[in-house]
Image: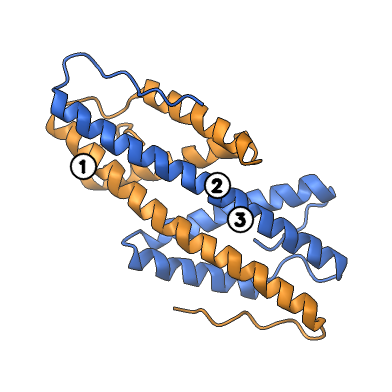
Chain colours: A blue, B orange
Amino acid sequence: MTDQPTPAPAGIDHAVLAELTRLRESIDNIDAAVVHMLAERFKATQQVGRLKAEHRLPPADPERERRQIARLRELAVSANLDPVFAEKFLNFIIAEVIRHHEAIAGDSGRAEA
Amino acid sequence: MTDQPTPAPAGIDHAVLAELTRLRESIDNIDAAVVHMLAERFKATQQVGRLKAEHRLPPADPERERRQIARLRELAVSANLDPVFAEKFLNFIIAEVIRHHEAIAGDSGRAEA
């Protein structure tokens, strides 16, 4: 783990540096939390993929995806985040889920994210 | 909030449907958590941006960014996630941070993410 603080540029006021360090530590904590939550999320989508394959259900579910996007956009607004960003975020995750499914199954079909 | 369960395709076994619903609820919970963590993360990067502007520090810090990428890649490995994905994720977030800074300041420079 490379958790040493990033060295400060020369000549920064001590209080400013302390505040910058405080904020960076929060950002690093959040990033660690998000990476672990995404690991858990991919475990769930892999289980969904397996379940659907076993029971011959269609891999993609456009209605479920439409609801996911609408819900994330609403959550983003309530969290004071750009809803366009929330939708881009879900699409970014969906692209990774599809990549996982392709890597496992050798198929190139759309999968539930 | 659109939290009604997604209607099931006709003819799915009840136990399979229950398992699919359980997994989807976990995915939705994780997405809500991640959206709120990202909202908190953007609050922190906006404070960093403000602090740097006030104290005339350079907006970007390539050494800090290099360390962030290295750390996220290590965290990803420990969480059984693809480290390439973790790096793509950080780049996705960095693009959004830059978009925020551009929207606020009207500048197009690289900013700390």
Indicate the quadrant where residue B96 lies: top left
Q: Residue at x 57, y 50 (%)?
A: A38
**What x and y, as percent, mark residue B23?**
66, 67
**What x and y, as percent, mark residue B63?**
39, 20
Q: Residue at x 27, y 36 (%)?
A: A22
* Number of the label disc, if any, that sits on residue A36: 2
Q: Amino acid at mark 3?
A: Arg
Dot 1: few (<14), some (14–19), or many (≥20) neighbours within 10 Å? Answer: few
Disc 1 with disc 2 on a shared chain = no
Question: Disc 3 vs disc 2: Cβ atoms closer than 8 Å?
Answer: no
Query: For the residues carrying marks 1 and 2, which lies nearer the camera in this image?
Result: 2
Query: For the residues carrying marks 3 and 1, which lies nearer the camera in this image?
Result: 3
Q: Can you see residue B102?
A: no
The residue wearing badge 3 is: A41
Q: Residue at x 61, y 48 (%)?
A: A39
Q: Amino acid at mark 2?
A: His
Q: Secondary structure at mark 2?
A: helix
For this rendering, which residue is in front, B4 or B60? Answer: B4
Q: Can you see residue B109?
A: yes
Task: From the viewer's perspective, tell me whether residue A58 is left or right of residue A11.
Answer: right
The residue wearing badge 1 is: B105
**What x and y, as percent, mark residue A19?**
21, 34
Q: Secondary structure at mark 1?
A: helix
Question: Quadrant location of the N terminus of chain B?
Answer: bottom left
Q: Earlier in the sequence, mark 3 or mark 2?
A: 2
Q: Residue furthest bottom?
A: B10
Question: Disc 1 vs disc 2: Cβ atoms closer than 8 Å?
Answer: no
Indicate the quadrant where residue B8 lies: bottom right
For this rendering, which residue is in front, B69 or A108? Answer: B69
Q: Amino acid at mark 1?
A: Ala
Q: Secondary structure at mark 3?
A: helix
Give the letter of the chain under mark 3: A
